[in-house]
Amino acid sequence: MKPHVSNPPASEPETPQKRTWWAASLSRGGAALFLLLLCLVFAISGRQIWRGWPATTSASNAEFSSSASAPVQAPNGDGLSSLQLPTGRTLVYEQVDHIYTIATGEKSSHALQTPGYIYNRAVPAVVTAGKELLYSGAGIWRMSLSGGSATQIASLPSDQVITSMVVSSDGSTLAWSSAPKDGSGTISLYAGPLDHTSRVYQQPADKCPCYRAFAFPNNDTHTLLLTNDRGDHRSVRYGLWKLTLGQGSSAQPQPYLSDADQQGPLALAPHGNNLLYSTFQGYVPMQEEHAPDDISSLSYANSLSVASIGGAQTQVGRTQTLLPEQGDLENTEEYRWVSTPQFSPDARMLAYTEFSVSNVKHFPRQYALYTVDLHGASGAKPQLLATSTAHYMETGAWLDDHTVTFYADNALYALDIQQHSVARITATGAYADVIAAIE
């Protein structure tokens, strides 16, 4: 019979036998209670251990379409919702070792077979309108993203380095430039059909402007826009010139945008001939930690302006200031710098990364993502899209007209500017540059 543990009735006399029974009852009851408490502790601890134990699904798979691991948040500090990536898109991105593709919805990337590829931040690979990949390194190579092997379409002497590579909007015409590795020799510009480029301009390497190809105006394969790298083979651009092709060696670059005041082109809109440029570019020290290995100190834009170019004009047309330059400031931490601006496919939106630099050791940066509605009713004003906790961040190509990609701390992400939602696309393990998104 289960012992009764209530106090004995007061009217019943207490005997030694009853005291013994009572002590035994308390002893048995205490043991039972102790065992119950012990089981409860084990149950709670086991639940906590189970919750903290690694799942059998890898972390990258579990977080694939989650915003939990994205190092961005809304301007008010709230987390962004999880984005369901649109299907039927393929991203092309490059790293130091290979060029990769990854389809939205897939969990792993595919390394392309790219013989002769040499990573060069200043000369990113290009995807043409016909879904062909052009990349540089030991010459220039061409391959179809639909399948097939890469073929070399231009060779390069061993003492030269490729400094630029651009393709026309219809994908039919290629332009590229080369310069001597040691600075002694000649700079050459080449242009023509993809498989048959020929030299269109040449100059001594010690005579600047040191031209490199910047872009073809949209729907124009007879005009090549040039910029000046001032002998620096990294990703720097100052001033803007145009070179009319088909005129032989007599053709001379005609100035569009002076480089005297640190002005420089940043991007050309995919539709129309709207040029994004900066009226001032400043030297910014590079952080020593968590940065791509190929970047040292570079010049970055401190302003953003848009102007029309094209036709017979020899200067930029009506200019619209998106972000005014800041001028001289006493505190360098107050400067905001712009990197990797990207036009949306329909050219209505502009996205860019903005950062400031701290003066403390290692020059840490604080990043944010901005967008500009270039056709907005209230005028083209930059809007803060998200702030970031990333150590290093860059904007990538747009996935569609309202979804922009970005790189942050060894992973690629997509952010929907309409739904304010984000998803991780893939972990890259190192710096990666999204160069195109194709259907």
Image: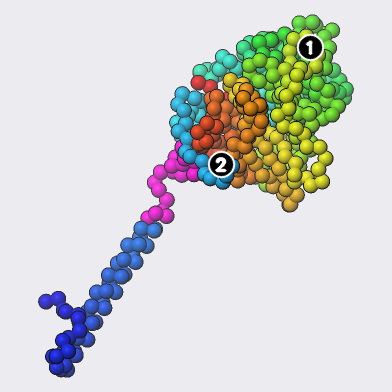
Secondary structure under tag 2 reads loop
In reply to whether residue 433 is colored magenta, the answer given is no
Task: Please indicate whether residue 118 sits to the left or right of residue 62 in the image.
Answer: right
- Residue type, label 1: Gln
Residue at the disc numbered 2: 74
x, y percent for residue 40:
31, 66
For residue 258, say whether it is visible: yes
Q: Quadrant of the N terminus?
A: bottom left
- Residue type, label 2: Ala
Q: Residue furthest top?
A: 247
Q: Residue furthest front?
A: 378
In reply to whether residue 51 is colored magenta, the answer given is yes
For residue 287, say whether it is visible: no
Q: Residue at x 74, y 16 (%)?
A: 309
Secondary structure under tag 1 reads loop
x, y percent for residue 185:
84, 22
Q: Residue at x 33, y 65 (%)?
A: 42
Residue at the disc numbered 1: 313
Region rendered in magenta: 50-69
